[in-house]
Amino acid sequence: MAAGGPSGPGTDNSVKIFANIFIAFIGAGVLGLPYSFKEAGILEGSFIMALVGFISGKAMLLLVDCKYRIIERNKRGENLVGMKEDGLYASSPATPQERQDLLKDEEELVTRIKNPKIVTVGDEISYGDVGFEAMGSTGRLFVDFAVVASQIGFCCAYLIFICKNLSDFVPSVGMVQWLLMILPPITLLTLLRSLNSLAFTSLHPREVSLENLPFFFVIAIYCYEGAGLVLSLETSLAQSVRHKFRSYFVSTLVLVTSLYIAFGACGYLTEKLSHVHGVSIRSLIFGFSRKTLFKYC
């Protein structure tokens, strides 16, 4: 088999893995960063963006850790049930040696979580499963509701963004008409069960402004909307390279955060955006014709 070729479900191609993760985090939120940096300041904006990136990355990797802990716990539970049925498991550990063995098993479990082994497709875990393990049915309901609500919000923001800019370029067609035209093809994308199919597409400034900190913080969180895809991204990897997801994810997120900071700071320093109150592709074109823009798109 050639290097980078398929080896079962998912992809083991490094470029496609990077593209999947990169595209999950680069979205419309990045276009609001220059104005956000103008309101918050260069130093505060850079610090908050780096902080949000670190916290978001850590939280998303904890989700992956939770997934493998749940899988391991389920396997251990099945093994204990089998031992009981076979008469090989009589009671809980009573001697110090047995307790020490259990502690050793727990340490090995933590090690396996940090360096997860290859799992079968049937072992995949959803966000609702993680919530159920933590808080039961209430946790599953809460997590599923949070995921659905956040994704609906992101989708609405993208639809407004797309329709507004299409309407700017073709004024004769209103936003409602554009929405009706783009909804069918966008809806078809929801039929894709795996992210593998999308991998190929994949002046003197104000330093600090505490007054505008909440505004910038919200924009920074919006830029990391890919949090709702982390388990799907991890599942999209081939089983042979799935244990490398952490390194792929961290390196890509560092790059994305650096690009966010650079884009926000440079955009503000270049234009100052003192007259910009909304995000529009048309307002970001300085000295370029529509024809040139479409060529680059």
Image (cartoon, rainbow, N blue to C red):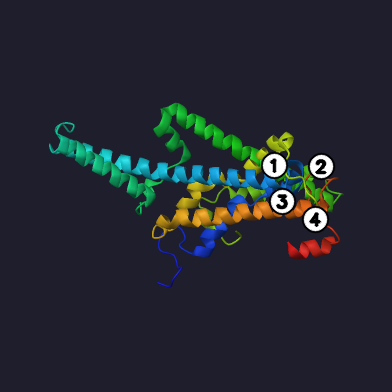
Quick one: quadrant of the N terminus?
Answer: bottom left
Tell me which amino acid carries mark 2. Answer: His
Question: Number of marks in the image?
Answer: 4
Q: Nearer the viewer, mark 1 or mark 4?
A: 4
Of all residues, the one furthest to the left in this rendering is 87
Above or below, 6 relative to 270: below
Q: Residues within 10 Å of mark 2 (few under 14, many from 20)?
A: few
Tell me which amino acid carries mark 3. Answer: Gly
The answer to which image quadrant residue 214 occupies is top right
**How far separated are the C-alphas under marks 3 and 4?**
10 Å
**How far separated are the C-alphas under marks 1 and 3?**
19 Å
Q: Residues within 10 Å of mark 4 (few under 14, many from 20)?
A: few
Read off the residue under disc 3.
Answer: 264
Read off the residue under disc 1.
Answer: 157
Mark nearer the N terminus (3 vs 2): 3
**How far separated are the C-alphas under marks 2 and 4?**
16 Å
Does the image show residue 102? Answer: yes
The answer to which image quadrant residue 209 occupies is top right
Tell me which amino acid carries mark 1. Answer: Ala
- Is 123 left or right of 215, judged from the image as shown? left
Element type at mark 1:
helix
Q: Residues within 10 Å of mark 3 (few under 14, many from 20)?
A: many
Q: Position of residue 68 (x, y in %)?
A: 38, 45
- Is 32 left or right of 5, judged from the image as shown? right
Mark nearer the N terminus (3 vs 4): 3
Read off the residue under disc 2.
Answer: 277
Question: What residue do we see at 76% from left, 41% from top?
Answer: 39
**How far separated are the C-alphas under marks 1 and 4?**
26 Å
Label for residue 270? 4
Element type at mark 2:
loop
